[in-house]
Image (cartoon, grey):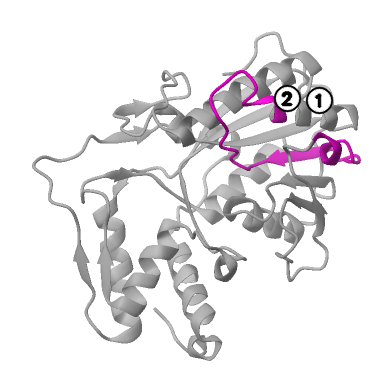
Amino acid sequence: MVDDNAGTAGVVGPDSQSSVLVVGGTGHVGASLCQFLSNRGHAVTAASRSQRLIFDDAEIAHLKMDVLAPTEVDQLSTFPIAVICPWVDLPDDETSQPWIGRLVRRLVERGTRLLVYVSSMWVYGTDPEDLLTESTLVAPNNAYGSAHAANEAVIAASANELGVDLAILRMANLVGPDPFFRFRTKISFAHELMEMALFDQSIVLRSPPSTARNLLPGSLFHHDIAKLLDRPLVEGRVDIINLGSGSTSTIISLAEEIALMAERWHGGLVAIEHPEESKPQLQFRLDTTKIRQIAGPHVDDLFGELSRILRQVVSGHDPAAVIGKTV
C-alpha cells in the first residue's frame, strides 16, 4: 500500500555513506544485514539486548538497547535510516504493542527520515493459498504472524502521523549464513536441516513433505533492501512490499537439495523422514512484482546460500574441516 496522501518526493534518498541503526541487529536477519550494510559503506550500529555477540567487523558499532525499556530507547542518537527487525511476543492486550510506537517516535524526534520494518509473509496466515499480493487480507493465526500484524498497524499509523518514509517488508523465509550461528540456542531451519544432513546423515521433517515454502536467498534480500534505502525519500509514504523468491518450493524439495549437498560433502547417504500426508498441502505464490519493479532483477541463488550455510556449519564444528572442500 502506498499512502495517496504522501508528500511529493523532493528529498534526495540516503546515500551509501548514511548511518543506519539496525534494531535487532544481532538476530538472524539483522546480523547478516549489518554485515552487508557495513561492507556497502554505511556506518552501522546494531542495537540489541545482547552484549555477548560481537561482530568480527570492528566498523559495526553496538548499542545495548531493550526496546521494551523506555529509558534505553530514550538514549538513541541520530540515525537517518533505521531498520527494525526484532519480533517481540507479548500478551494480546491493550498494552501489548506500545514499544514500537514509542521507538518510532523517538527515532523521528532524533532525525530518522527513513524507516524499514521487517515483517513476515505469515501475516497472511500459516496456511496461505493462491496468489498473495500486498492487498491480500491480513489474517494471522499464530503468535508470530499476529505480533507482526499488530506491529505493522502501529508503525504505519505512527509513520503517517510523523511524516516519515516507511517501508514494511513482508518477508518470506530467509536462507543464508548467520554470523552468530554457533552461539544461538535456536538456529534457522536451513541451518538445522544442514546440521542433520551432515552429522546425523538423516533429515527429520516436522512438516508434511508438500508444505509450501517461499525461500528468500540472503543475497536477494540484501540487493532489494539496498535499492529501497537508495530511493528518494517521500514524506508520509507507507509502502507495504512482499519480499521473497520468484517461485514457491516445498519443504521436501529443500530437504532433498540439502541432502544431496551433504552427500557430496561426506560421501554417505542421507535419509529423509517426514510425516505421512493423505493429500497435498495448500500451495501459494507470493507476488513479488512490486519489489522487482522497485529493485530490478537479481540472481535468485538459493544453491549459493545453501553452499555458504554448509561451509558455515562445518567450520562451526571443525574449523579445519572446511579447508579445500567443495560442494
Q: Disc 2 marks which amino acid?
A: Gly
Mark 2–mark 1 Cα distance, whole angstroms, equals 6 Å
For the C terminus, the image quarter is: bottom left
Q: From the top left corner, tell me how far across and down residue 194 is, in percent.
A: 38, 69
Residue 2: quadrant of the picture = top right
315 above or below 111?
A: below
**Disc 2, disc 1: CB below 8 Å?**
yes
- The magenta span reads 70-99
Q: Which residue lies at the image location 32% right of the left edge and 73% below the top edge? A: 197
Q: Which residue lies at the image location 33% right of the left edge and 85% below the top edge? A: 266
User: What secondary structure is the magenta-colored segment mainly?
Assistant: loop
Q: Which residue lies at the image location 42% right of the left edge and 20% below the top edge? A: 136
How busy is the neighbourhood of tag 2: few (under 14 within 10 Å), some, or many (20 plus)?
A: some
Q: Is residue 129 on the magenta stretch?
A: no
Residue 293: quadrant of the picture = top right
Q: Which residue lies at the image location 42% right of the left edge and 26% below the top edge? A: 140
Mark 1 lies on a secondary structure that is helix
Picture mark count: 2
- Label drawn at residue 105: 1
- Label drawn at residue 101: 2
152 above or below 188?
A: above
Left or right position of 283 against 22: left
Q: Residue furthest left?
A: 278
